[in-house]
Image: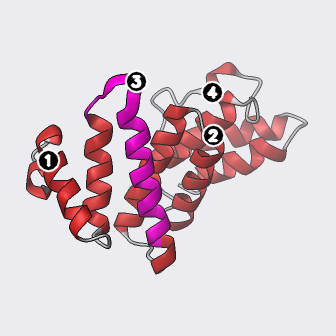
Amino acid sequence: GLALFEKGAWAESLPQLALAVSRDNDDLEALVRLADARSRVPEVNDRHISTASSYYTRAVEACVRDGRTDEIYEQALLGQARMARFTGAPLTAERACTALLGIDPENEEAVEILIGLKAATGELLPEDDELLFRNGRSLAAWGEALREADRSEEHTSELQSHSDLVCRL
């Protein structure tokens, strides 16, 4: 199943990955790959998203239980954040991104998801609309622009904390 997954044969890898996970509940690499493959093969009523989400959650919980902070845990957290964002579960997405950034502060996708969530909920709204989007800037440049805007605005709480998050990159 892993070989098919690596080739991008998502649908073909699903049965083999599911079998590997059913035979060995501790095979977290297979579980994360199963979640990723499942998320890429559409099903009616977006069932593939809820199924992938449950697999990612299972993997995250197993990693936490086992004290793992390796690449598999990072991939599970990122997958969980993606699925949560897609299904409209911002708190789950935020928790996953925050945990991931605690391990890998330079994870660009986690930063982008987190900032997108904050902007969507109105918690991070700079006065300059151009700052809502990265617009080809590096994360460091975007973060510096957010910090500079924050210095010129009177409110500092959320904008400051998230611009600092971006600037750590």
Q: Secondary structure at mark 2?
A: helix
Residue 90 is left or right of residue 52, and the answer is right
Q: Which residue is mark 3?
A: 45
Point out the frontmost of discs 3 and 2: 3
Point out the frontmost of discs 1 and 3: 3
Q: Residue at x 8, y 55 (%)?
A: 3
Q: Nearer the viewer, residue 137 or 14?
A: 14
Crowd tier of the residue under label 3, counting other residues whose Cα lies within 10 Å: few below 14, some 14–19, many 20 or above: few
* Quarter assignment of residue 101: bottom right
Reading the chain from its start, which is encountered first: label 3 or label 2?
Answer: 3
The kind of residue tagged 4 is Leu
Q: Which residue is mark 4?
A: 132
Tell me how far mark 1 sits from mark 3, CA to CA: 21 Å
Residue 167 is left or right of residue 19, and the answer is right
Crowd tier of the residue under label 2, counting other residues whose Cα lies within 10 Å: few below 14, some 14–19, many 20 or above: many
Residue 120 spot, x, y in % from top left: 66, 28
The kind of residue tagged 2 is Pro
Q: Which residue is mark 2?
A: 90
Q: Which residue is mark 1?
A: 13
Do the residues bearing badges 1 and 4 touch, measured as CB atoms within 8 Å? no
Q: Is residue 46 magenta?
A: yes
Q: Residue at x 67, y 31 (%)?
A: 119
Residue 107 seen in this snapshot: no
Q: Which residues are magenta?
A: 41-63
Colour scheme shown: secondary structure
Figure check: 39 above or below 44: below
Tell me how far mark 1 sits from mark 4, CA to CA: 38 Å
